[in-house]
Amino acid sequence: MNATTVRCEDVIRQVWDWLDREQDRAQWEAIERHLADCTGCASHVAFARSFLHHAKDAPLPDDLTALRVRVGTALTKARSG
């Protein structure tokens, strides 16, 4: 991803890393600028933030290993698709 030009696809692909601030400063700022102008991506980020907010308060199942495997599989499929 070019730090000065960010496409919607780049933002959607990197939304979780962006929320966790796991990118270098230039990439993070480029996404910030994109979100200021793109309501579609901004609403996607709002959903992701809401999801994280609600997920942190959700009760955890007794078998966390199975949950980790299911989430990991879902994320792998989402990233490759």
Image: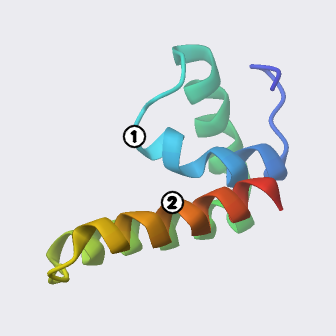
Marks 2 & 1, CB-CB < 8 Å contact: no
Q: Position of residue 57 (x, y in %)?
A: 15, 76
Residue 65 vs residue 41, the one in the foreground: 65
Residue 49 - label: none
Q: Position of residue 1 (x, y in %)?
A: 81, 26
| Amino acid beneath label 1 | Asp
Element marked by disc 1 = loop
Instruction: Tell me the colour scheme of the image.
Output: rainbow
Q: Residue at x 58, y 65 (%)?
A: 73
- State left or right for residue 67 relative to residue 22: left
Q: How many marks?
A: 2
Query: Is 63 drawn above or below residue 76 in the view shown?
Result: below
At label 1, counting other C-alpha atoms closer than 10 Å, the crowd grade (few under 14, some 14-19, many 20 or more) is few
Q: Residue at x 29, y 66 (%)?
A: 65
Whichever of labels 2 and 1 marks the residue nearer the N terminus, that label is: 1
- State left or right for residue 7 relative to residue 53: right
Residue 36 vs residue 73, the one in the foreground: 73
- State left or right for residue 59 relative to residue 12: left
| Amino acid beneath label 2 | Gly
At label 2, counting other C-alpha atoms closer than 10 Å, the crowd grade (few under 14, some 14-19, many 20 or more) is few
Query: Is 73 drawn above or below residue 27 in the view shown?
Result: below
- State left or right for residue 63 relative to residue 9: left
Identify residue for label 1: 20
Identify residue for label 2: 72
Element marked by disc 2 = helix
Q: Position of residue 36 (x, y in %)?
A: 63, 48
Q: Position of residue 30 (x, y in %)?
A: 67, 28
Query: Is 30 drawn above or below residue 60 in the view shown?
Result: above
Q: CA distance from mark 2 to mark 1?
A: 17 Å
Residue 10 vs residue 4, the one in the foreground: 10
